[in-house]
Amino acid sequence: METWKKNMAETKQHYMDWWNHKGIVLNMWEHFQEGVTPHADVPAPEPPKDLNQKWFDPEWRAAYLDWYVAHSSLLADILPVANTQLGPGSLAAILGGVFEGGEDTIWIHPNPHFTDDITFDPENNAAWQLHKDLLRACKKKAQGHYYVGMPDLMEGLDVLAALKGTDKVLLDTAMQPEVLEHQMQQINDIYFQVYDELYDIIREGDEMAFCYFSAWAPGRMTKLQSDISTMISEADYRRFVQPFIRQQCQKIDYTLYHLDGVGAMRHLPALLEIEKLNAIQWTPGVGEPQGGSPKWYDLYKRILAAGKSILASWVTLDELKPLLDNIGADGVHLEMDFHNEREVEQALRIVEEYRGKSSSTPTEAQAPSAEQEKPADSEAVRVQTPREEDEELKPLFDAIVGGKLEPAVEVTRKAIEKGVPPQDIINNYMIKAMGEVGQRFQDGKAFVPQLLMAGRAMKGALELLKPLLQGSASTTIGRVVIGTVKGDLHDIGKNLVASMLEGSGFEVINIGIDVPAEKFVQAVKDQHADILCMSALLTTTMTYMKDVIDAVSAAGIRDQVKIMVGGAPVNQAFADEIGADGYSDNANSAVTVAKRLLGVA
């Protein structure tokens, strides 16, 4: 294989050292083209006719990637690799999820015909055929000048969430854990079957490259992850994630785990227990400093001390030397934030000072974790006790906090039969129970599945009360319209906020995902909403919140409704900038903000 990368042999050695927890890899994710002398006279293809051609036409994408790599910088350890991704977690599409090409990414919608028994039919499977056709077209076009990357198949809970919906998977951890474990094994078994066939297409001898993080290995490698793990407890991670990650590490020679977000830090001990896991990549998440920040030095030291290599992402030039001074120069993969070749050369000069020097074993440091931020185990969990009267209704509080639907419904039914005022049931038991669950969540004593289970129990009981409340002026605190903005298909955070608001006495109209401005405006008008809540999980979609606010103003109803915003990339400064009335970073505090906006104690 004669690649366009002149120093490929040197880069291979850097990677082999890194997989063995030695030395430094100096790379970047993706590539830059500005100021780069092309490696070959490869013409750019005609612009794609539409998004379908951009993402799902193997011949067009192969031609585009051929041009892309030919015009990309390959200095330092930047790899010559064609990015053949078909969306994050494309195994979900192979198993029945529905592809949709967006401007910047590929969405995979849940399988409308999903059943609990997960099977793989390689025949008459358009998504599976697309994967193979794309890799073969790219391999033919590459002619040995660059590697064809392994698509980001993903695995486990993340794939299942794409197939059936995140909230359903989280509920399954509590409602049908044995079924969930069986599904994890089914997904893993299929993963190996799919991986093996794709590896045989892309491999160069035994070598291969992976699209995500542009990594190379002298044998079979993969990137592992469980982004949904930020929402589950350590015990659930050890039951539904760790065993299946361990299987992959046993079957695949070189493994890199993508640890995503501060909320996932609590699972690091379980990861470090997996002996055959080679390396861990750290993504801090939106709103946090990137991978070169001193904030993460102790995290890297802890991983390195456990015998794993690290991958630090989006490191800047000014962060490079302090990072290496603090964590050492063995087993360090640097994904730099390069913009031009001058910056690459500057980084190379810095890294050369460290290459060849044997670093002493870093002192193990405790990474910040959710556990460290929690009260000590001996500290009693605060319990909000309902009024002493109505002894028979106390089980309703317990049922909602415990997420038990049937008992909550039964207690409520009996209370109605005995003539207990519906508003008393809501105010003195349901709202207090949801408040207790929200507080436990905020304190790190409960996780998203517990919030969902509590919301499910609360809603079941509330359905019995709604017919009795019609026409009552004191039925609700206020009316809320909530939705995820146009271009964004994420709904778990929005649904949690909706559940907490409803459980706290608000009437909530949930208008879904990918909501355009005109639909928000019409819903506010039709429902006479007191509050409009918008959610976004992507930096590319959060700016649309300003469009919605402008549309509300243009409709002449801005002074009639309060507007709240939230979501991972959103912060208070952004909320102020676009003219929102309120901002919240979690479902529990959203209730407090909503009450404040309406002047409710």
Image (tube, helix red, strand yellow):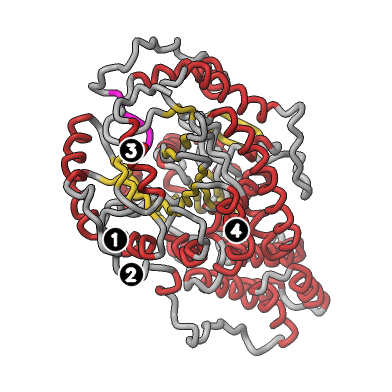
Q: Quadrant of residue 5?
A: top left
Q: Quadrant of residue 261?
A: bottom left
Q: Earlier in the sequence, mark 2 or mark 4?
A: 4
The reply to whether residue 123 is visible in this rendering is yes
Q: Quadrant of residue 428?
A: bottom right
* 550 is higher (above) or lower (below) than 471: above
Q: CA distance from mark 1 to mark 4?
A: 26 Å
Secondary element at image label 1: helix
Q: Which of the numbered marks, if any, corresponds to residue 241?
A: 4
Q: Is residue 209 left or right of residue 129?
A: left
Q: Which of the numbered marks, if any, corresponds to residue 297?
A: 1
Residue type marked 4: Val
Residue denoted by label 3: 28
Q: CA distance from mark 1 to mark 2?
A: 9 Å
Q: Earlier in the sequence, mark 2 or mark 3?
A: 3
| Residue drawn at point x = 34 percent, y = 59 percent | 300
- Residue 427 on image: x %, y %: 62, 74
Q: CA distance from mark 2 to mark 4?
A: 25 Å
Residue denoted by label 2: 365
- Residue 281 on image: x %, y %: 41, 51
The span shown in magenta is 27-33
Q: Are marks 1 and 4 in contact (CB under 8 Å)?
A: no
Residue type marked 2: Ala
